[in-house]
Image (spheres, helix red, strand yellow):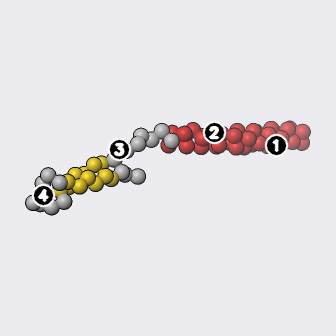
Amino acid sequence: MKKDAISTGLFIAIGFLCVAIVIAVLIPVVREVIDATDDNKPTIPGVTFIQPLDSSQTATARVLTHTSV
């Protein structure tokens, strides 16, 4: 009876150790995959806004560029 309890305890302890090793290996791999997906975001194009300098001067215009971050 005592041998059965010791072998069962060792089996459970080794099982927990294997699960801990697998989790310790998988967490960095999953983080790398998630970080790699964040790197593939598309770039947002900039916006060009043309505004006249004066209401009486419609031919002369000032170009304002805005790039979103």
Q: CA distance from mark 4 to mark 2?
A: 61 Å
Q: Tell which of 20 and 60 is nearer to you.
A: 60
Is any part of residue 14 visible from this angle?
A: yes
Please state which amino acid type lies under the numbered disc 4.
Gln
Residue contact at pointers 2 and 1, CB within 8 angstroms: no
| Residue 60 against residue 22 in the figure, above or below | below
Q: CA distance from mark 1 to mark 3?
A: 61 Å
Please state which amino acid type lies under the numbered disc 2.
Val
Q: Secondary structure at mark 4?
A: loop
Name the disc covering residue 19, or none: none
Residue at numbered disc 3: 45
Indicate the position of residue 42 as horizontal and vertical percent values. Answer: 41, 40
Q: CA distance from mark 2 to mark 1?
A: 31 Å
Residue at numbered disc 2: 29
Residue shown at the point (33%, 53%) measured from the top left: 66
Q: Nearer the viewer, mark 1 or mark 3?
A: 3
Q: Nearer the viewer, mark 4 or mark 3?
A: 4
Please state which amino acid type lies under the numbered disc 3.
Pro
Residue at numbered disc 4: 57
Residue at numbered disc 1: 9
Residue shown at the point (12%, 57%) measured from the top left: 57
Residue shown at the point (36%, 51%) measured from the top left: 67
Q: Which label's residue is closer to the chain start, 2 or 1? A: 1
For the N terminus, the image quarter is top right
Residue contact at pointers 1 and 4, CB within 8 angstroms: no
Determine which quarter of the picture holds residue 26.
top right
Q: Nearer the viewer, mark 4 or mark 2?
A: 4
Give neighbour class at mark 3: few <14, some 14-19, many 20+ (Cα, 10 Å).
Answer: few
Determine which quarter of the picture holds residue 11.
top right
